[in-house]
Amino acid sequence: MPDVPTKPDFAMLVRTFGRIGLINFGGPAGQIALMHKDLVHDRKWIAESDFLHALNFCHLLPGPEAQQLATYIGWRLHGVRGGLAAGLLFVAPGALVMLALSALYAFAAHLGWFAALFLGIKAAVLAIVVQALLRIAGRTLDTHFKQALAVAAFFALFLFNLPFPLIVLGSGLLGLMVSAWRPQWLVKAHQVETENVGDRPNWRSTALTVSVWLLIWFAPLALIGMALGPDHILWKIGVFFSQLAVVTFGGAYAVLAYMAQEAVQSFGWLQPGEMADGLGLAETTPGPLIMVTQFVGFLAAFRAPEPFTPLLAGLAGAALTTWVTFAPCFLWIFACAPWIDRLRHATRLKGGLAAITATVVGVIGNLSAWFALHVLFARVDVIDVGVARFSVPVWSSFDGIAAALAALAFVLMFVVRWNIVRTLGICAGAGLLASLL
């Protein structure tokens, strides 16, 4: 006989998710495993089947799936206040740590020892991204059509520099069409089921929820627009990361190359290697990896602070970035959660998601290539050939120390099988030692 889920009181929910927020290292896989053990296996707050179905539902949404799963479980147990408590406590500790690390980086980045430390971190990040690529590809690319989507996405980004949102949304639409015609191309035969829509939730309640959370999402932007105008850096940060929140399918690795491209090339907020530094910092903190957006927002505002001081502007940029990154997550969950049972057997939606996930493999492949070029070479040129536009390294700028550190990171992660935080620490120390020698 299956275990009957038990409902905790609100204080217990707060204490539990507060503890989870402090120890949820290891990226989405580790965070989901932690919640499964604690909430399903140990405490029995949610049934196994409901947990897995909620996880599949969160994969359909843009944004960090682990944080959204926490929000959904909180909502299921204690309504909106439970969802808010669980979702906020899941990200708050990591956000505070990331804010402190971003400020330290902004003030110390010009110091020689600090740059040497982060050379090792950059090298470790290259190994981390390649590991994520192999892991996701092995789990995802189980049909020839998905493999073709991944390859097409890689070349569309690497050779033709097509916009990331266009690729993600286009693959989703293609997936919806293919799932109606040849569903086995995207979802294995034993997974293709008849749709069962269940009871119809209240449309009026859903519309009210969407309206309220849209106001919450865009309220800071409205205040910034009225007080500082649309040319201010904070307005640009808010608009850019609001757009990013809508297309963040596949997690932080999927959008990182697009975010780096815009932040470095279009806006000039960061230098190429600094995006790898930010990802390295995010890997060492609890919470969703997408918290790397806070690092970008802090540095962007810190370096164009008028009329504020650099520190105050950086704090405002980080706070605004965090707000527009995670407010949409609550919107998606609170608006869509009542409809979750109608999606339990929605084959077309599963097909669209499968296409997006396959495309994300190609996107992460492009990110791996981008990081490799900017970590291993001091100079990278951009070549325009007709419709193609791609990066090539200046071979004379090859960094042997960075290559040796990257090789060390690959050995530690793929041969010795150390975890991410330990590998980052060893490589950072090795980078510092190399600079002293």
Image (spheres, rainbow, N blue to C red):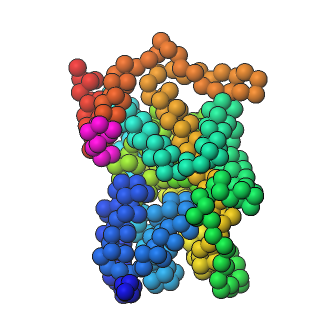
Q: Quadrant of residue 40?
A: bottom left
Q: Is residue 46 above or below residue 65?
A: below
Q: The C terminus is located in which quarter?
A: top left
Magenta residues span 412-420
- Residue 157: x and y in percent read 64, 36
User: Where, by quadrant of the figure, is residue 96 drawn?
Assistant: bottom left
Task: Residue 415: say if magenta.
Answer: yes
Residue 237 in picture, x, y percent from top left? 59, 50
Q: Nearer the viewer, residue 42 or 260?
A: 42
Locate the N terminus and report the quarter of the image it occupies.
bottom left
Q: Position of residue 278 (x, y in %)?
A: 43, 43
26 drawn magenta? no
**Residue 370 appears anywhere in the view:** yes
Eyeballing the image, is 4 above or below 146? Answer: below
Query: Could you tell me which residue is drawn at 27 percent across and 43 percent down?
Result: 418
Q: Nearer the viewer, residue 387 or 321?
A: 387
State left or right for residue 74 relative to residue 21. right
What residue lies at 70% left-to-right and 78% top-to-bottom? 207
**Residue 118 visible to the viewer:** no
Q: Is 129 located above or below residue 354 in the figure? A: above
